[in-house]
Amino acid sequence: MSILIKNVVLNNKKQDIFIEGNKIENIGRLNFKAEEKIDGKGKAVLPGFVNCHTHSAMSLLKGYADDFPLKKWLTEKIWLLEKNISKDDVYLGTKLACLEMIKTGTTCFNDMYWHAGGAIEAVKEMKIRAVIGLIMADFSQAGSEENVKISYKKFKDRLPENISLAIAPHAIYTVSKENLIWAKNFANENNLLLHIHLSETVDEVKNCIAQHKMTPVEYL
Ligand SMILES: [Zn+2]
């Protein structure tokens, strides 16, 4: 598949861009034949955006109790609802999120959610790049270290080039110190990113200082 984008602004200059397959082959004033021609007039070309923190399947829950403060929203609404979320829901929600990302210029995202297998299937089909976080949370068997180990083994050798894995302990207030240390070591041993919520609310900071005499960042 070849694409020619005509008259698009790049570094303050009008240029044409020729794409063959998944590579930019040429940039300049070009008169190439292409299977698809896009008029770039009035538009600028930029590198793809990277979204460093998503729960992409939650696109299905958009607007749900979104006027609640974080703790109330999690404990009274979201965590209850998430008990009934299936792998299929995650597959569909992640696909929807990918579609929205592709439409708005995001080409890579760093995700943290349940049922990683559903998210992986969605990203395989949608073909954008993603880091899929295997979530850890002490309140759920699904978020235990055994489960993360099982998931990691299951997925690690079956991923296409555009997908990699991360370890995703939910937060310092939902994952014990022992499990955070385990996550750190597991990530180091397997060369994985570590993805965590940190210092999100005034409450988290206050509670951490009361419990550990340190801010969340110092505690980590
Ligand atoms: Zn989050």
Image (cartoon, rainbow, N blue to C red):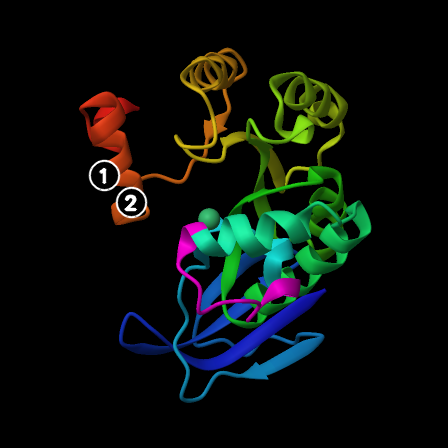
| Residue at x-position 66% and y-position 41% | 114
Name which residue type carries label 1. Answer: Lys
**In the image, residue 134 lies at what x, y percent?**
60, 32
Q: Mark 1 points at which residue?
A: 206
The crowding category of the residue bearing disc 1, from other C-alpha atoms within 10 Å (few below 14, some 14 to 19, many at least 20), is some
**In the image, residue 165 lies at what x, y percent?**
59, 32
The image shows residue 78, relative to residue 7, as above or below, that is: above
> Is residue 58 toward the left or the right of residue 206 in the image?
right
| Residue at x-position 30% and y-position 77% | 13
Question: Which quarter of the picture shows residue 64?
Answer: bottom right
The image shows residue 177, relative to residue 207, as above or below, that is: above
Q: Is residue 84 magenta?
A: no
Residue at the right extreme, as displayed: 88
**Magenta region: which residues?**
60-71
The image shows residue 77, relative to residue 148, as above or below, that is: below
The alpha-carbon separation of the residues under discs 1 and 2 comes to 5 Å
> Is residue 82 toward the left or the right of residue 202 in the image?
right
**In the image, residue 74 lies at what x, y percent?**
51, 50
Q: Name the residue under label 2.
A: 203
The answer to whether residue 52 is visible is no
Q: Is residue 66 magenta?
A: yes
Q: Front-most of 46 and 186?
A: 186
Name which residue type carries label 2. Answer: Asp
Q: Is mark 2 on a helix, strand or loop?
A: helix
**In the image, residue 67 lies at what x, y percent?**
44, 69
Question: Which quarter of the picture shows residue 101?
Answer: bottom right
| Residue at x-position 68% and y-position 26% | 141
Predominant SS of the magenta segment: loop
